[in-house]
Amino acid sequence: MSEPEVQFAEAQHLTGLIFRVAERAKDDFAVAVAECGLSLTLARAVLILGEPAPMHEVADQLACDPSYITNLADQLEAHGLAERAAGTDRRVKLLQLTPEGLEMRERLSAALEEGATVTRALTAAQRTDLGELLQQMLR
Amino acid sequence: MSEPEVQFAEAQHLTGLIFRVAERAKDDFAVAVAECGLSLTLARAVLILGEPAPMHEVADQLACDPSYITNLADQLEAHGLAERAAGTDRRVKLLQLTPEGLEMRERLSAALEEGATVTRALTAAQRTDLGELLQQMLR
DNA sequence: TATTGTTATACTCTATAACTATA
DNA sequence: TATAGTTATAGAGTATAACAATA
């Protein structure tokens, strides 16, 4: 195969396609998130906090160091989106969304569902197929 | 719908699934890239440089500021993977892979194709279907 | 006057290590 | 002795603005 053909073939490879689709979806979501005045990580934290959770659990779910959650929690509080609350164990602090935080979570959730221009290119049946394939990949 | 059901439904939504699959693929690729001693961005640059390219074109393809390419080019040269070369226009500097760079590109390319554990969960037919759906999303 | 690349600088994101309080 | 969270600090990654050379 000549070089251009190799490149073309590579461009078709699944992993590259997944990356490109994900990047586009992320860009779309980032626009919505920026309109809300949040960073991507902050938005992820808000989405995670459907229910109050210990800070170390948030760290687990975001796959980041627990020390960084202090920073994120400070930012969430500064935005008025979440508060620290006492847990049963006095070492633990729960992070819980304020009413504003819950409202923000709704907005972000809607943006995540509807905002991705990529999924609009598919029919309902195709979306179903895609969803099944993706779920199988995560098993 | 009660809260846990809502969360479950959200977890199924396409955009979220795409993000999770992409994150897993990226983690897989990052492992291979780290074994090569490169950062993800550096690896992307190597993959882009199948042929010598002006630095500003690399910036376009990486979707980053042109000034940052100076930094990346310095790093690539420090790794012995690429060199700056003169272009026809004397303002332009071409970035081209060294033999080591080309070899690295092969390794990365192979890692990208084979390394993603996510795609292994699919049959050949399913991979074909997925590829077609993804391509349609990028059109 | 516009374009290419470079420099200096600064900002954001995130991790590491040492620390405190609690278990 | 182990766990939760905090603090201080440092590093990577990247952008902005001003600049030099060339077109």
Image: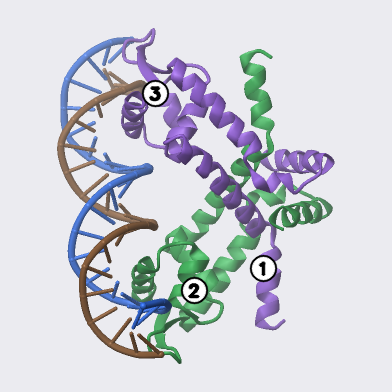
Chain colours: A green, B purple, C brown, D blue
The N terminus of chain A: image quadrant: top right
Tell me if label 2 and label 3 are in contact, CB under 8 Å: no
Say what secondary structure mark 3 lies in: helix
Q: Which residue is mark 3?
A: B55
State the residue at coordinates (78%, 56%): A132
The residue shown at (42%, 36%) is B38
Label at residue B10: 1
In the image, is residue A11 above or below residue B23?
A: above
Q: Circle 2 is placed at which residue position?
A: A57
In which image quadrant can residue B56 be found?
A: top left
Residue A81 in sight from this viewpoint: no
Q: CA distance from mark 2 to mark 1?
A: 19 Å
What amino acid type should be assigned to the residue bearing mark 1? Answer: Glu
Instruction: Mark yes or no: residue A38 visible.
Output: yes
Q: Earlier in the sequence, mark 1 or mark 3?
A: 1
Disc 1 versus disc 3: distance between alpha carbons? 42 Å
Report the number of discs.
Answer: 3
Quarter of the image containing the C terminus of chain A?
bottom right
At mark 1, the secondary structure is helix
Image coordinates for residue B86, horizontal then vertical, percent? 35, 10
Locate residue D13 relative to residue A5 in the image: left or right.
Answer: left
